[in-house]
Image (cartoon, rainbow, N blue to C red):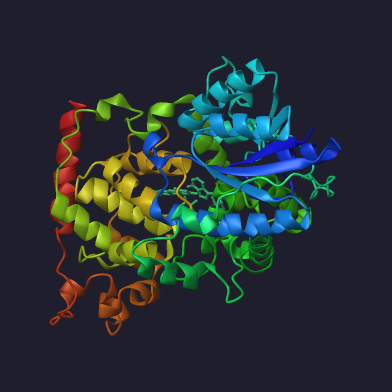
Amino acid sequence: APVIVWFRKDLRLADNPALFKACQTGQPVVATYILEDQTQIDFPLGGASKWWLYHSLMSLSAALDGLGIPLILRRGNPRQILDALCQETGADTVHWNRMYDPYAQTRDTEIKAFLTNNGITVHSFNASLLVEPWHVATKTGTPYKIFTPFWRQARNVMSSTPPLPRPECPPAFQQSLQSDHLTDWSLRPHPSYWAAPLAAQWLLPSGAGIGEDAAQNRLDDFITCALPDYDTGRDRPDQKKTSQLSPHLHWGEISPRQIWSALELIDPLHDYSGQFRAELGWREFSTHLLYHFPQITTENLRREFDPFPWRDEPAALAAWQKGRTGIPIVDAGMRQLWDTGWMHNRVRMITASFLVKHLMIPWQQGAAWFWDTLVDADLASNSASWQWVAGSGCDASPYFRIFNPVLQGEKFDPLGDYVRRWVPELKNVPAKYIHKPWNMTQPPASYPAPIIELGVGRTRALEAYKNIQN
Ligand code: FAD
């Protein structure tokens, strides 16, 4: 009987324990990806995520073909579909790699119980974390809420087993199974003009650029070209100094263990990867938080923020979303996000801080926009990072520390190249004014004036914060 492998956020062949162990059984392997009814899920796929998923599944399907395993695409309720697949194929074993968000946890537990009751064996594996969230705990057995001790402990308990290779071809499964056509899943964006800039950013002319091979290439390029000065370069949105591996990691086109083991090959005498490893640590920490505190997706982790007088400002929110706030570094970031589905980390912090502090708009509204527009939209990292910026997370930047977007821009985009790239209205503005065009005698007429005077926004936010402290 064949073994069924249910692909989810692990869209790769190498270092994929669910697939590897299935191939190792010597039985034929049936691979499936199930698109769930998006109206039934707490956090349905955002627009950019769907676009990425489309291309990632194309790539996975081609790679699996190379192993003689067709990828069976089905749409609907995963329990019913897995049950049907077991019955159609006679399979008595199902493999998958674990997911950690609350919805998937509940779903997987129910499916496992259901299948087990029906005599099907389920094996689940860790494929997306360096360390399981339940393997890192304080001395008293509680989850960590602070990054530094979490990471110290995580590094102690992290397994040092090397990543698994691509599996060998299993015996072919002779029966042909019904599969949907990917093009019928409406994953590509409507309106379709959104797809062009996304494709320009991520797809190579050959159509590659998304998927396992692309992720490996990106990692290799990053280690050679950008890692040596990552410590300082990572804060510069005007330069290409970060890995841009986030969507590949999110969709599991590469595993953190593969990245870790590539870093281990660096000569220890010249190992400059500490900061980069710590960023992978933040990814682990975010998942640890989501797993132990599933409410972080919607509720303040620090409940003293509950009475905060957030403002309901649809016009300001729309200006922020469209990159029309009149604050150059904020607008550049928001337009980079819209066009490419990705934004530099420093600018994510600046744009998020501007929304929750200067505009006093709830972090949940910002997180929702990021969720829809990021190709790396990740429930753990997005929720934890927004709470970090808002000050409502456990190990958060304090609310009273308010980023000044002008000073941030001058420090991290000193010549204004990043702003000019994304805000063409400012392309002729000299560096001296690029982050504060309102100080020019004649600012470019096509660019909006700031929707809020920065000093006014800052004072208002600090007042509001003081009031919830009392
Ligand atoms: P690199 O600097 O090359 O880092 C390598 C990897 O480490 C990243 O690919 C990512 O997986 C991980 N990483 C780096 N920084 C962080 C971080 N602060 N928190 C968690 N993981 C991190 N990241 C997401 O993957 N998905 C999100 O939805 C997301 N939302 C965010 C929202 C806000 C408001 C902020 C401030 C940050 C958010 N981040 C999110 C974290 C971070 O901005 C991105 O992971 C990073 O910019 C991705 O670029 P990179 O791959 O070049 O990162």
Confirm whether residue 308 shows in the render: yes
Q: Is residue 252 left or right of residue 374?
A: right
Residue 461 falls in which quadrant of the image? top left
In percent of width and height, residue 313 lies at 14, 48
Between 326 and 398, the one lying in front of the other is: 326
Between 241 and 229, the one lying in front of the other is: 241
Residue 130 falls in which quadrant of the image? top right
Residue drawn 59% across the image and 17% down it: 139
The quadrant the C terminus occupies is: top left
Confirm whether residue 149 shows in the render: no
Q: Extreme bottom residue here? A: 428
In percent of width and height, residue 347 lies at 38, 59
In percent of width and height, residue 177 lies at 67, 45
* Tag count: 0
Residue drawn 20% across the image and 36% down it: 465
- Would you place residue 122 above or below residue 369 in this image? above
Residue drawn 73% across the image and 31% down it: 91
- Would you place residue 425 above or below residue 279 in this image? below
Residue drawn 56% across the image and 27% down it: 108
In percent of width and height, residue 70 lies at 70, 51
Residue 2 falls in which quadrant of the image? top right
- Would you place residue 309 above or below residue 371 in this image? above
Q: Is residue 452 left or right of residue 396?
A: left
The quadrant the N terminus occupies is: top right
Between 73 and 238, the one lying in front of the other is: 73
